[in-house]
Amino acid sequence: MKSIQFMVLRSFLPVFLAAILFFVLILQLADLFSNLWRYFNNNVSILQMGKIAYLYLPMCISYSIPMALLFSISFTLGGLYANNELIAILGSGISFYRIITPFIVLSLLLSVFSFWFNDSIVISTYREKNNIYKELLKINVSYNRSNATVISDNNRIIYQTEYYNDKKKTLTGVLLIYRDKDYSFLKRIDAAWAEWNGSNWVLHNVTVYTWNKDTKTVTTQRMDQYSGKELVKAPDSFRKITRKVDEMSYRDASKWVETLKKSGLPYREALTNFYKKISFSLTPLIVALIAGAIGSSFKKNILLMSLLVSLSVSVVYYVMQMVALIISKNGYIPPLAGAWGSFIVFFVVSIGLLKTAKT
């Protein structure tokens, strides 16, 4: 029994590696040709193009693994069926499910690897690739922001500002709310503007309203300048949100979602993409189940049919995932459903297909 499983794996592995190389090449060429005219217009050298392609390589591998797994399993099982080897194996009393068990185990290992690979390597290289791409193509990103609301790390100070200038590191139209340990109101500070001195914010044209709990009265104090040593919230916190969860590690993405929640900013999109990090890493399991169910159906044109099926299933899966993410980001379904919806649908379909497979 084990020798048959090893035989199937030996037939599978070379095809799998070749398929990864093929799909990586397709993704690299698609990225290159879609941006080629931009490179020429901005006099980007071949070496710089090569560096972008090199940094894009881990992302290509990440996307290629599920497609290559689907293709190679379908091709391997189709080859066994075309050569009547599958019929002989099943006729000897060996269950079809035992034949595809190594593929399922391998897909689980690849899922774990994909999560680690994406979190440790893909994120950093893809972020660097995007930064170099923007730099070479002279794409400027403005971090100035209107109507920014931020909360301090200890949740005791709430910052509200009409405008943040990232270049000058200044705030305009500042309102600060101070809260006690039990989060009851302590005082309010209004300032015309504020500047960052490297360690904390310095407020100008300040009015302080202090609440006295004992007398139930408010005292008012005006000053030209107030240098609050407690106002240490970094200027980056007031920037226009340009950070993408796709370019963050799992731990950083978790912290970012919590920061958005505490700041009262929209976080559905970030939370949905955060959940997607786990669901996407389990894609190899889904494609292995589907390939195991339909791979034994091909007896002719195995190479062509395996390639068409792998591309078709991959496109449908990614499109369904994209649609679910968009619906979730617009608030029609919960973020968890948006991230896991396509996975659950394909998992149920794959189980149904396995039950009707030739066994």
Image: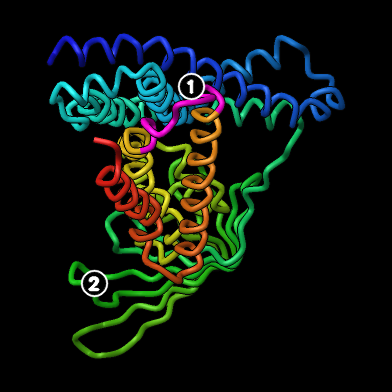
Tell me which residue sits at (44%, 42%) in the image.
199
- 195 inside magenta stretch: no
Q: Foreground residue, 257 or 239?
A: 257
- Evaluate whether residue 9 shows in this view: yes
* The quadrant where residue 5 appears: top left
Residue 192 location in percent, x, y? 59, 67
Left or right? Give the position of 202 relative to 89.
Answer: right
Tell me which residue sits at (54%, 68%) in the image.
191
- 299 inside magenta stretch: yes
**In the depicted structure, whether residue 300 falls above or below residue 173:** above
**Residue 58, disc:** 1
Residues drawn in magenta = 294-304
Q: Earlier in the sequence, mark 2 or mark 1?
A: 1
Q: Which secondary structure lies at badge 1?
A: helix
Tell me which residue sits at (29%, 46%) in the image.
356
Residue 61 location in percent, x, y? 47, 23
Disc 2 and disc 1: Cα gap in Å?
46 Å
Q: Which secondary structure lies at badge 2?
A: loop
**Residue 183, disc:** 2
Residue 237 location in percent, x, y? 47, 51
